[in-house]
Amino acid sequence: MANAKSYSLGPGLSTAEQVAGFCYLPFYVVLLALGIEYLSGLLGLGLSQLQINVAYFVINCIMIWVIFHNFLLRSFRAIRFWELVQALILGFCLYYAGNLLYSLLVQLLKLQVPSYNDETVAALLTQSRWVMLVCTIVLAPMVEETLFRGLIFGVLRRKSRIAAYAVTILLFAAVHVWQYLLVYDPGGVLLSAVQYIPAGIALGWTYEKCNTVWGPIFLHMLINAISAGIISLL
């Protein structure tokens, strides 16, 4: 696409990519999942929760590549291997340290924090392990990091670093728990969102460190691979 901009995070988004990305964002967050469920009922398809989730991940990934393929390819060509490796190692250490601090606070305050999203993923993994591993480890990180870090963080970072971190961390946490607000106690759901803050911080920092959106994509893949492995063993 034309009019592509470059700034401190490496290759930037063109104006067309920004507009298309922000227009698609509500579909990713809310409308697509609801639309799939509605069409499943309307057409009498009787899709299972696993099938709905797979359709959601696949459609999102296709749309991300349709909208952002130039940005993703520009970012891939901008990778500096050793800079990327260093960013991934330090980013994972930051994530691990944040998780450790979170665990210590939970123990200190004697809180019982539910993990609704992990429970959902674990249930889906029992239905079709390899399909869900592909969705969780490959598709989800690519979609989420392109939207949260590439689009939202990238646009806000040019104006305010604090705003970029604050908005993406809050949205990243919210998108993993909001669907449970109508099912479970809102207090528990909001408390469960806190566990996503360390990842939100580490992913944003990794993007800044390596100047390519593939940094947070690969780190997110690593985090999800470890989490899925642990969940599948429970």
Image (tube, rainbow, N blue to C red):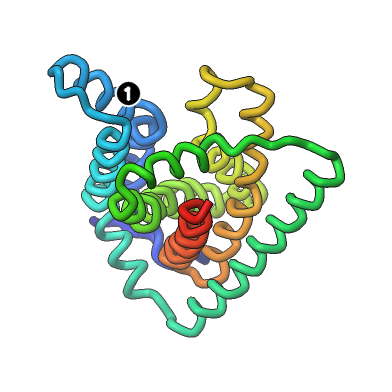
For mark 1, does the 10 Å Cα neighbourhood hold few (<14), some (14 to 19), or many (20 or more) residues? Answer: some
Q: Which picture quadrant has residue 141? A: bottom left
For residue 175, side relative to residue 169 (left or right): left
- Farthest residue to the right: give it: 108
Coordinates of residue 217 in the picture (x, y in percent): 43, 61
Residue that numbered label 1 is attached to? 34
SS category of the residue bearing label 1: helix
Query: Is there any visible trace of residue 26 in the rendered image?
Result: yes
Seen from the viewer's position, the closer of residues 54 and 79 is 54
- Image quadrant holding the N terminus, namely bottom left
Residue located 32% across and 59% down the image = 71
Residue at the image position 66 percent from the left and 28 percent from the top: 188
Relative to 4, say whether 43 is above or below: above
Question: Closer to the camera, 207 or 61?
Answer: 61
Q: Position of residue 98 (x, y in %)?
A: 70, 57
Quadrant position of residue 60: top left
Q: Is residue 146 left or right of residue 161?
A: left
Whether residue 14 is visible:
no
Between 210 and 54, which is closer to the camera in this rendering?
54
Residue lying at the far top of the rendered structure: 42
Residue at the image position 33 percent from the left and 29 percent from the top: 33
Count of numbered circles in the view: 1
Relative to 175, 184 lies left or right: right
